Image (tube, rainbow, N blue to C red):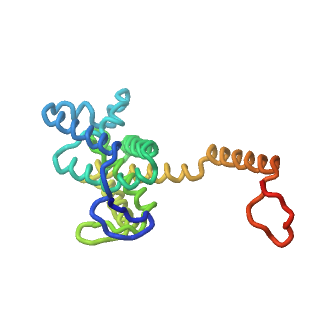
Amino acid sequence: MRRYPSPYASSFSFGPGPVSTALKALIGVNVVMFVATTFVRSLVNQLGLVPARVVPEIWRLATYMFVHGGVFHILFNMLALWMFGAELERRWGTRYFLKYYFVTGIGAGVLTVLFSVLPFPFAQQVHYSNVIGASGAIYGLLLAYAIYFPDRPILLLVFWVPARICVAILGAIALLTSFSEVGGVANATHLGGIVVGYLFLKSARVHPLSELKYRYLKWKINRVRKKFDVYSGGRGADDWDRRVH
């Protein structure tokens, strides 16, 4: 049986492990859509994210994630989905992983639309552009990977760098190129995936409803302990006659 490294260990390995059911489904849908759009090119315009047409065509915020512009586009996106998604899904579980994937992907689309209405030339070019690809969600996964495995080495061009530094570099590139007229369209979405991923993970840690549930459960446990006279194990110098139930 193959063993995988500890999430907290910094080590090299060939790939993150086997492809899970969720990853197979996501990759499969992307491949099917790529084949479909290759033969029916009109689907790219119908499913891509065009900010000027989002209202009332709201479905574009989700469908754009499954449309890619070429072989290398889908190849690198699906490779990144497997590399970073497999380990995150093992840590989170399938349900939370899929939730995070779609929240960051759709959220990146929403931020792209908001970015496109800014009164600046570099933003206005995005308003009528057709944004496609899963890169928004992929950048969200990259951020999560850097948070959970900050010292895990990632090959960036020809150098191995810690995950946290890799994400910082990619985020800076996305931010700078978002204000240019050359790469602003795609990189606005990339940056959106990072921003939404950060906000999602931060809110999950301090979610008020989860905190209330935790406090209520703790109160119930303490109440049951007192009711049934439950004490912690072990014996101190002054509790030799304590009953343990």
* Residue 66 in sight from this viewpoint: yes
Q: Position of residue 166 (x, y in %)?
A: 35, 65
158 to 103, vertically: above or below = below
Residue beneath the point at 84% across and 61% down: 242
- Please state if 100 lies on the left or on the right of 35 as rendered: right
Q: Quadrant of residue 148 in the image?
A: bottom left
Q: Position of residue 11 (x, y in %)?
A: 35, 70
Q: Quadrant of residue 143 in the image?
A: bottom left
Residue beneath the point at 67% across and 45% down: 212
Residue beneath the point at 23% across and 33% down: 45
- Please state if 68 lies on the left or on the right of 220 as rendered: left
Between 162 and 56, the one lying in front of the other is 162
Residue beneath the point at 42% across and 44% down: 94
78 to 43, vertically: above or below = below
- Please state if 106 lies on the left or on the right of 24 as rendered: right
Q: Position of residue 7 (x, y in %)?
A: 43, 63
Q: Quadrant of residue 159 in the image?
A: bottom left
Q: Position of residue 87 (x, y in %)?
A: 38, 55
* Residue 118 in sight from this viewpoint: no
Between 84 and 37, the one lying in front of the other is 84
